[in-house]
Image (cartoon, helix red, strand yellow):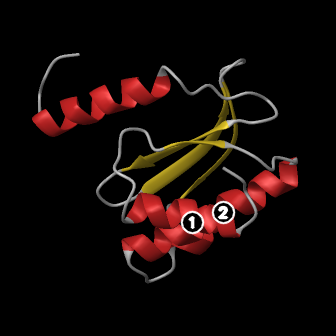
Amino acid sequence: MKIKDKKQYRRFRIKMRIRKNIHGTEERPRMTVFRSNKQIYVQLINDQEGKTLVSASSREKGIADNKATKTEKAKLVGQRIAEKAKETGINTVIFDRNGFLYHGRVKSLAEAAREGGLKF
């Protein structure tokens, strides 16, 4: 990877350190979070087949229309992913923060997903 930015490089190194130990399966998929400056995205991924099972983002209809802060939208995304996972029969996941620090939007998404019934 070409070093463009020290922050990006640091996050990439953390991400690779996490990913060498975490692998999602059909029964327990990997819940990965991506946080951009404006939006937040989350996916449940089966790494054995390389398929995304369920996804949610802050760009979906009920969330994007809502006039709320980014942290509040992340909480709504966490609730949405928990609902979708329950519909497909997924109860437990492996949380992958994707190199982002566990605070702010990532933390509120994770806590909302836990409150929604996902176990990790």
Residue 46 visible to the viewer: yes
Q: Is residue 14 above or below residue 108?
A: above
**Where residue 111 is drawn, which disc sits there?**
1
Residue at left 17%, top 39%? Answer: 7
Question: Left of 98 or right of it: where is 9?
Answer: left
The local secondary structure at tag 2 comes to helix
For the image, the number of numbered tags is 2
Question: Left of 10 or right of it: where is 26?
Answer: right
Residue 104 x %, y %: 36, 65
Residue at left 50%, top 51%? Answer: 41
Closer to us: 67 or 46: 46
Residue 39 figure quarter: bottom left
Question: Left of 95 or right of it: where is 90?
Answer: right
Residue 84 x %, y %: 76, 56
Mark 1 burial class by Cα count in 10 Å: few <14, some 14-19, many 20+: some
What whole-number distance in Å separates the C-alpha atoms at marks 2 and 1?
A: 5 Å
Query: Split into 4 quadrants, where in the image is the N terminus?
Result: top left
Labels 2 & 1 near each other (Cβ < 8 A) = yes
**Where residue 10 is drawn, which disc sits there?**
none
Mark 2 burial class by Cα count in 10 Å: few <14, some 14-19, many 20+: some
Q: Is residue 5 above or below residue 55?
A: above
**Where residue 114 is drawn, which disc sits there?**
2
Residue 60 visible to the viewer: no
Identity of the amino acid at label 2? Arg
Question: Left of 62 or right of it: where is 97?
Answer: left
Identity of the amino acid at label 1? Glu
